Amino acid sequence: MSGELWSRLRNKEYRDEYLVATLTSTLAYQIEALRDQHGWTQTELANLIGTTQSVISRLEDPDYGRANIMTLFDLAKALDVALLVKFVPYSQFVTEYRDVSPQGLSAASFSDEDSTHNNLIDNNPEGTFAAEADAATRYYPTTGAGIRV
């Protein structure tokens, strides 16, 4: 991160505006990039999540900034990708949003990464992935669908 950006982030008003502007614009660009990655029109994506083309158009507008978490869940399910929402320090936030190119905003669907993941598990059956699954089971309750996370 540049020293100039960090210096500007010391100002609370700038920091607040930077957070909102970066997150809303990047989210809009990523929705469009992922839709394009799948080769879908706005109407096709809208149909997959049970909404209209105009809603997708607004979500892809970097000035809109009013996406709600339930719509993001619907998009994640339609795109077959995970959605990560968590509070982080600014240094991590700035690093995460450094590359906003279409390549930087792409995300492989679960089916696209499944074979790679299976190869990793095959080469490490009782290692890292087993430990992660055990940790997730300990710390997260059963979901409403009866699925243990």
Image: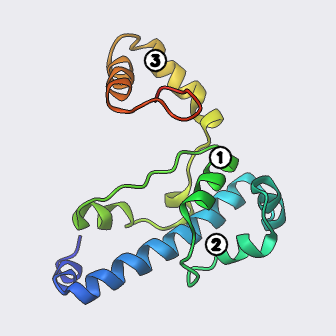
Label 3 – label 2 distance at C-alpha? 36 Å
- 79 left or right, relative to 40: left
The residue at which mark 3 appears reads as 121
For badge 1, the amino acid type reads: Lys
The residue at which mark 2 appears reads as 59
Mark 1 and mark 2 in contact (Cβ < 8 Å)?
Answer: no
Q: Position of residue 5 (x, y in %)?
A: 24, 80
**Could you say whether the residue bearing mark 3 is in a helix, strand or loop?**
helix
Q: Position of residue 85 (x, y in %)?
A: 42, 55
Q: Which mark is residue 77?
A: 1
Q: Which residue is at 23% across, 62% downward?
A: 89
Q: Is residue 6 above or below residue 148?
A: below
Q: Which residue is at 65% across, 55% downward?
A: 75
Q: Which residue is at 58% across, 82% downward?
A: 64
- 127 left or right, relative to 45: left
Label 1 – label 3 distance at C-alpha? 24 Å
Q: Which mark is residue 130?
A: none
Q: Residue furthest front?
A: 144
Counting residues from the start of the chain, the first of labels 2 and 1 encountered is 2
Q: Quadrant of residue 57?
A: bottom right
